[in-house]
Amino acid sequence: MSVLKNTSPKLIVFSAAVIILLIVAALAPLIVPHDPYAQDLSQALLNPNSAHLLGTDRFGRDIFARVLMGAQTSIYSTLVLVFFTSVIGIFVGVAAAWFGGIIDSLLMRTSDVFLAFPALIFAIAVAAVLGGGIQNAILALVAISWPKYARIARSLSLEQKGELYISAAKVGGASDFQIIFIEILPNIIGPLLVTSVLDIGTMMMELAALSFLGLGAQPPIAEWGSMMSDNRNLLQIAPWTVFGPGLAIFICIAIFNLFGDSLRDRIDPKRRKK
């Protein structure tokens, strides 16, 4: 109860919104009102109505059903992307800070090489080399996104490296592995968690952008960026075909960003309102 008392109403509200999004995405195959992949050309490009809340696309597929199904692909693919990006970056950054010397120089110079390229352009190039597909899009974005986490983790780890508790752990005979995973990581995970949550919106946009360009999810898979790409030529005559997935992207990014902001206020005492 004391934890709830110290938790801001904003954090509770947006935490609930994130949970609802994840539940809806997980249960999408069970709650879709129509088969999102069933084509019926006699129902093509219907206006939004009681039977089809967001209308239908050029193949007669229900847009609302495809947006719901696309939530599973778009949201969970983004979470997988952020997880692997942050894990790789964090371990690179902590290793660089702890071992120092040539290892630090090698890892940080490698990150500099990746940071030298415009992120999305580099991701497009990597995805094009790997070929289309949501898995390859995730790999491409992981390849260009980890250096940010590495630099943040390195900076935080260097601050912790000189603390007395680290010296005490060394005197106590703790191994490098134990110091990194038991002593350092728990003390730097808060800011890194906030960074990961705030990055979800950006990663979702980038993943949708790759799909929009044909380098991510491939038709007929329901994915919001791919859906917008499929229907972009119909924007003037059937705008609802783009409005549905576009609105879904906007809502998800807004919720995750607001959740990240409220989580940052909760974790960082300097930002917490008194």
Image: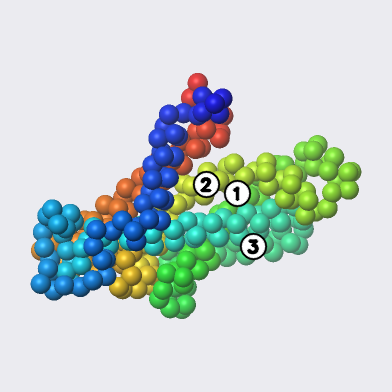
Question: In x, y percent, where is residue 67?
Answer: 28, 59
Which quarter of the figure is the N terminus placed in? top right
Q: For mark 3, give the secondary structure.
A: helix
Question: In x, y percent, where is residue 184?
Answer: 72, 45
**Residue type pointed to by label 3:** Arg
Name the residue tied to disc 3. 109
Q: Residue at x 69, y 53 (%)?
A: 94
Q: Residue at x 81, y 37 (%)?
A: 164
Foreground label between 2 and 1: 2
Marks 3,2: beta carbons within 8 A? no
Name the residue tied to disc 2. 195
Instruction: Spot the residue most to the top.
Output: 274
In space, the residues marked 3 and 2 are separated at their CA atoms by: 22 Å
Marks 2,1: beta carbons within 8 A? yes
Name the residue tied to disc 1. 152
Q: Residue at x 51, y 28 (%)?
A: 4
**Residue type pointed to by label 2:** Thr
Foreground label between 3 and 1: 1
- Local packing at callout 1 (Cα closer than 10 Å; few below 14, some 14-19, many 20+) is some
**Residue type pointed to by label 1:** Ile
In space, the residues marked 3 and 1 are separated at their CA atoms by: 15 Å
The front one of 17 and 261 is: 17
Q: For mark 2, give the secondary structure.
A: helix
Q: Is residue 49 left or right of residue 116?
A: left
The numbered mark, 3 or 1, whose residue comes first in the sequence reads 3
Choose top left, top right, bottom left or bottom right for residue 30.
bottom left
Q: Residue at x 46, y 72 (%)?
A: 136
Instruction: Spot the residue most to the front.
Output: 30
The front one of 267 and 97 is: 267
Residue 250 to residue 164: above or below: below
Whether residue 172 is visible to the viewer of this picture, yes or no, is: yes
- Local packing at callout 3 (Cα closer than 10 Å; few below 14, some 14-19, many 20+) is few
